[in-house]
Image: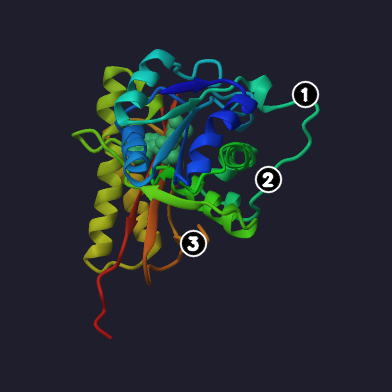
Amino acid sequence: MDVTRDIAATRRALAIPRARGDRIGLVPTMGALHAGHIELLATACQACDFSVATIFVNPTQFAADEDLAAYPRTPEQDYDVCRAAGIDLVFQPTAAEMYRPDASTTVTVAGLDRHLCGPHRPGHFVGVATVVAKLFQIVQPDAAYFGRKDYQQLAIIRRMVRDLDMPVDVVGCPTVREADGLALSSRNVYLSDEHRRQAAVIPAALRAVAERIAAGQTGVPDLTTLLADTLRSRGPLEIDYASIVDPDTLQPLETVAGPVVVAAAVRIGQTRLIDNLEVDPPATGD
Ligand code: AMP
C-alpha cells in the first residue's frame, strides 16, 4: 500500500491502474478510522480493482468554534486499517497541498443545505462539496463510497455529481453501530462514560419513531414530539434538530406518505452527534 501526500504523486500512482483499465474506488475520510469506515473500505475493495482512501481533516468544513484542532488523528493506526482492508493507496494531503492561499472556487449545492445540519453548521456543506469535488478531480474514481450515517452529506454529494455531470457512481453504505445501537463516529471518543451511556438514547429514539411509522402512524408533529421527548428521557442534552424529512429534498414533512428519513442531531456535553434512520411506511394495499 502506497501513501502519497501530494497531488502530483497521487496522479502518478493512479496512472498505472488507470492505464490497465482498473475500476478505481475512492473512500474519502477524515481518519481516526473505525468499523464504520471499514465498511466503506471493504465495500470499495470488493467492488473495485484499485481502491484509494483519503485521510484529510478538511479545515474548510469546520466552523471557527468547532473541533478542528481537537479532531482525533491516528495516522499509524489508520494505515494499518487501510492495509488490512485491502486499500491500494492512501492519499493524505496537508491543508496547504489542498488549498492555495488565494483559492476562490467553491461548490454550493443550494437548497439541500437549508435543512437538518445546514443551519447549525454554516458553510459546512460548501466545505464538504468542495473538498469532495477536488478529491474526485485528483483521483478520478469510477465509484466513491459514503456512509448513510451522514445522510445529508450523501444526498448533497449525489446532487453535486448529478448536477455537474461527474462520472462517478456514488455508493451509500449502511450505518455501522455499537451493540447498544450508537452509530460509530470518530467523535464518540470525546464522550465521558456517563455521556457514552446516555448517547444510546439517540438510536433508541429513532427506532421508537420508526416503529410508530411502521405501525401506520402518519402525523409528523406527534412523531417529532415523541422523537424529542425520547431523546431527552435519559438526561439533559441539547437538540439541534429532531426531524422527519423527505429523503430526496430533505424538507420537513407534515405527514408520512412514503419513505422518510428520521434524523436527529444532539449535543451531549460538548459532543455533537448525528444519526438517522430511513423508514418506509407500511404498504396501504391500494
Ligand atoms: P468521516 O471520517 O467522519 O468524515 O467519515 C468518512 C466516511 O465514513 C463518511 O462517508 C461517513 O458517512 C462514513 N461513516 C462514518 N461513520 C460511519 C458509520 N458509523 N457507519 C457507516 N459509515 C460511516
> What amino acid is labelled 3 in the image?
Asp
Is residue 179 something that shows in the picture?
yes
Residue sitting at x 52%, y 54%: 158
Q: Which residue has dot 1 on it?
A: 101
Is label 2 or label 3 in front? Answer: 2
Q: Amino acid at mark 2?
A: Val
Q: Secondary structure at mark 2?
A: loop
Marks 3 and 1, how far apart at CA = 35 Å
Kind of element beneath mark 1: loop
Q: Residue at x 35, y 47 (%)?
A: 47
Asked if one can make out residue 239 in the rendered structure from this viewpoint, the answer is: no
Label 3 neighbourhood size at 10 Å, few (<14), some (14-19), many (20+)?
A: some
The residue identified by callout 3 is 248
> Quarter holding the N terminus?
top left
What is the C-alpha distance between the residues marked 2 and 1?
A: 17 Å
> Is disc 2 in contact with disc 3, using a CB cutoff of under 8 Å?
no
Using residue 216 as the reference point, say whether residue 30 is left or right of it. Answer: right
Is 139 in front, or is 176? Answer: 139
Q: Nearer the viewer, mark 3 or mark 1?
A: 1
- Alpha-carbon neighbours of circle 1 within 10 Å: few (<14), some, or many (≥20)? few
Mark toward the start of the polypeptide (2 vs 1):
1
In the rendered view, does 217 fall on the left or right side of 114?
left
Would residue 81 appear left or right of 103 to someone viewing this image? left
Q: Secondary structure at mark 3?
A: loop
Disc 2 target residue: 107
Is the residue marked 3 within 8 Å of ligand 1, measured from its CB? Answer: no
Label located before the other in sequence (2 or 3): 2
On screen, residue 283 versus residue 159, left or right, reads: left
Which residue is more in the foreground, 259 or 83?
A: 83
Ligand 1 located in image quadrant: top left
Of label 3 and label 1, which has the lower sequence position? Answer: 1
Name the residue at 81% across, 28% down.
102
